[in-house]
Amino acid sequence: MVAPNLAALTRPDFPLLAQTACLGQPLIYLDYAATSQKPRQVLAALQHYYDHDNANVHRGAHQLSARATEGFEAARSKTATFIGAANAREIVFTRNASEAINLVARSWGEANL
């Protein structure tokens, strides 16, 4: 059995990749360490959030903040389940790869050096 081509299956989910580059060739984006492209499902979820729930997470006593916090914690729980974490509290979201690497290095260093 031939494995499906992952790129062919997922490329249509990324609107930005529908562009053409030099000489009419399909756009290829490789700079994911700097900025990751978002699939349309993520763009739709972000649009819904900004349209309906945009508020500070864990910092408000109003309905919008409660919904934003609920969504944030639901994402943490889903992530924990997806990667097999023992507890959702083990999941830490960071802004980017550099912040994540620095957090791991500092946490390990403080515990082991």
Image (cartoon, helix red, strand yellow):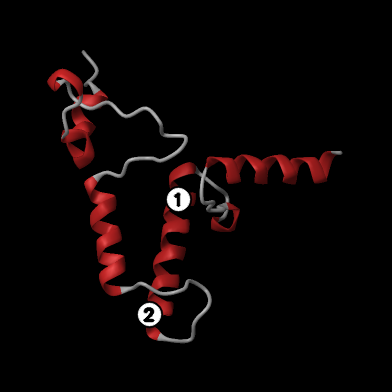
| Label whose residue precedes the other's in the sequence (2 or 1) | 2
**Total numbered labels:** 2
Indicate left or right for 80 with 89 as reference: left
Q: Residues within 10 Å of mark 1 (few under 14, many from 20)?
A: some
Q: Secondary structure at mark 2?
A: helix
Residue 61, percent from left and from top: 48, 86
Which amino acid, mark 1? Thr
Where is mark 2, residue-wise?
64
Is 3 in front, or is 32?
32
Which amino acid, mark 2? Leu
**Quarter that holds the C terminus:** top right
Q: Residue at x 38, y 75 (%)?
A: 67
Is 63 in front, or is 76?
63
Q: Residue at x 54, y 51 (%)?
A: 94
Residue 92, percent from left and from top: 57, 53
| Image position of 28 with respect to 81: above or below | above
Q: Secondary structure at mark 1?
A: helix
| Mark in the foreground, 2 or 1 | 2
Query: Which residue is most to the bottom?
Result: 62
As measured in the structure, the alpha-carbon distance from the residue carrying label 2 to the one carrying label 1 is 23 Å
Indicate left or right for 17 with 50 as reference: left
Does residue 14 appear anywhere in the picture? no
Find residue 39 and report its image quarter.
top left
| Image position of 62 with respect to 72: above or below | below
Q: Residues within 10 Å of mark 2 (few under 14, many from 20)?
A: some
Where is mark 1, residue-wise?
79
